[in-house]
Image (spheres, grey):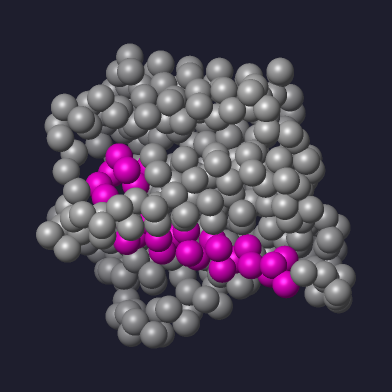
């Protein structure tokens, strides 16, 4: 039960991180530069945590003779982050949420069933499938799919995104979600090998910073910090995204070997949706206030039921 509650708590920080990074992007201009700043803050946070809590930095020698995929967590994280940037204008808000979530749930269950990435095995039975369906259904309700359909939430873009191209982007959305679940399993196993979840998260962020730095240099993003038009100042909380991201990656690395990748993904998704509803309902962190509807509340309850089915039965 502790693992489930901790997973929900870890998930709660993600919507806050998203808002913080979105606000940071307005001030620095480039989404890649905002991601680099966020990753750098997270890297420094984890570096300090490793020295204070573990008393040492992770020892790369412990990975000698181990599979190369142990180092892929940071690369997967950057792929997911960058993927969402490209998905939104092509698929719209609803599909950008639902398709990656579907990929996360599917991949999490497959990793558990086959024991990929040395994850603890859990057979894919009717109960786990039912729980997954409840969770995905809850996500549809929590993001207000019915409201979106009534508004006819159209894909933003040109004719080039139609037909086969549109379906290619939809498949990419599922794949990015699968990358996210894979990152959870990889960082969890890296934490086992290194003997510290903090060290695993630090390695992941180190790789992420290196990759993002190459992207920023390659795209020749303009460096600078300003106050967006129509705003008086930059809020202090726009800098905490990296700190929260570090906590999120640490939580994933800690939980995955304990409760399994599938359940880790699902409990964190539950926390993410709950946090999003709270931010929208109260208009926190500069977000436009959007009171919780009955449909969204029922969607969250459906997600709770899905996690409970998998955890208790």
Q: Which residues are magenta?
A: 68-97
Q: How many marks?
A: 0
212 to 292, vertically: above or below: below
Q: Could you tell me which residue is drawn at 57 percent across and 23 percent down? A: 130
Q: 38 or 77: nearer the eye?
A: 77
Q: Residue at x 40, y 44 (%)?
A: 99
State left or right for residue 152 relative to residue 35. left
> Which corner quadrant of the image does residue 89 belong to?
bottom left
Q: Depth check: 6 or 187 in front?
A: 187
The image position of residue 292, as x and y in percent, is 32, 21
> Residue 223 appears in which quarter of the rendering?
bottom left
Please indicate whether residue 301 sits to the left or right of residue 266 in the image.
Answer: left
Residue extending farthest front: 164
Q: Going by the image, does 210 lie left or right of 258?
A: left
Residue drawn at the location 79% of the way across and 43% of the way down: 120
Can the viewer see residue 27 in this picture?
yes
Judging depth in this view, the residue of 166 and 134 nearest the camera is 166
Quadrant placement of the N terminus = top right
- Report the residue at 64% width, 27% height from top: 128
Q: Can residue 8 be seen at all in this image of the molecule?
A: no
């Amino acid at each position: 039960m502790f693992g489930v509650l901790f997973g929900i708590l870890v998930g709660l920080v993600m919507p806050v991180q998203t808002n913080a990074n979105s606000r940071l992007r307005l001030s620095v201009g480039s989404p890649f530069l905002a991601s680099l700043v966020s990753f750098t803050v997270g890297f420094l946070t984890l570096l300090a945590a490793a020295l204070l809590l573990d008393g040492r930095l992770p020892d790369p020698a412990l990975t000698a003779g181990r599979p190369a995929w142990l180092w892929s967590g940071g690369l997967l994280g950057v792929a997911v982050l960058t993927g969402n940037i490209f998905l939104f204008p092509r698929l719209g808000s609803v599909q950008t949420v639902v398709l990656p979530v579907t990929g996360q749930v599917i991949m999490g269950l497959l990793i558990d069933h086959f024991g990929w990435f040395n994850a603890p095995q859990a057979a894919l039975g009717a109960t786990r499938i039912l729980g997954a369906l409840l969770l995905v259904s809850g996500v549809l309700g929590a993001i207000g799919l019915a409201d979106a359909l009534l508004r006819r939430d159209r894909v933003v873009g040109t004719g080039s995104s139609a037909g086969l191209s549109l379906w290619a982007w939809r498949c990419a959305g599922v794949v990015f979600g699968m990358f996210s679940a894979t990152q959870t399993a990889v960082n969890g196993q890296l934490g086992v090998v290194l003997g510290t979840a903090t060290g695993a998260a630090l390695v992941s962020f180190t790789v992420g910073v290196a990759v993002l730095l190459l992207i920023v240099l390659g795209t020749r993003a303009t460096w600078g910090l300003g106050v967006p038009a129509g705003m008086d100042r930059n809020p202090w909380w726009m800098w905490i995204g990296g700190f929260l991201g570090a906590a999120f990656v640490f939580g994933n690395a800690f939980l995955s070997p304990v409760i399994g990748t599938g359940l880790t993904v699902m409990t964190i998704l539950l926390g993410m949706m709950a946090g999003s509803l709270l931010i929208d309902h109260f208009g926190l962190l500069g977000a436009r206030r959007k009171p919780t509807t009955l449909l969204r509340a029922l969607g969250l309850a459906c997600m709770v039921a899905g996690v409970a089915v998998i955890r208790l039965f």
